[in-house]
Amino acid sequence: MENGMLWFDGRKDIPTEQKIQNAVVFFQKKYGSKPDCCYINATSRQKENSQNLAGLRIEISQYVLPNHFLLEKDH
C-alpha cells in the first residue's frame, strides 16, 4: 500500500456509509484525491448490503477490526 489510510469511527448512531464518507472527505484533504477501495470488517458489512458505499469498492477483510475502515487508492 503506497497511498492508504486507516480510519476509526466507533459511533453507534452513525450508519456505516456516513462513517466511510467522513473518512473519504479526510482522505481527499490529506492526499488530494479520492480513494478507490475501502476494506471493512464483516460485522460492519451485515448492516449494509451494497458492494459500493460512498462511491467506493467495498472489500471484506478479516484483518480490519470492527469500526475501522482501510481506505486505499488503486495504482
Image (cartoon, rainbow, N blue to C red):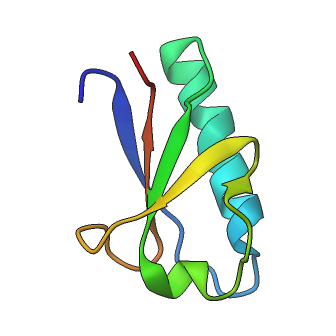
- In the image, 21: left or right of 35? right
Q: In percent of the image, x 75 and y 41: which residue is there?
A: 55
Q: Is residue 59 above or below residue 6?
A: below
Q: Is residue 52 above or below residue 28?
A: below
Q: In percent of the image, x 45 and y 81: which residue is there?
A: 42
Q: In percent of the image, x 50 and y 21: which residue is there?
A: 30
- In the image, 59: left or right of 3? right
Please provide percent x and percent y for residue 74: 43, 24
Please provide percent x and percent y for residue 39: 43, 56
Q: Which quarter of the figure is the N terminus placed in? A: top left
- The residue positioned farthest toward the front in the image shown: 51
Q: Is residue 32 above or below residue 14?
A: above
Q: Nearer the viewer, residue 2 or 25?
A: 2
Q: Nearer the viewer, residue 26 or 69?
A: 69
Q: How many marks?
A: 0
Q: In percent of the image, x 55 and y 80: which residue is there?
A: 44
- In the image, 48: left or right of 70? right
Q: Which quarter of the figure is the C terminus placed in? A: top left
- In the image, 64: left or right of 36? left
Please provide percent x and percent y for residue 65: 32, 75
Please provide percent x and percent y for residue 53: 73, 55
Q: Is residue 72 above or below residue 53?
A: above
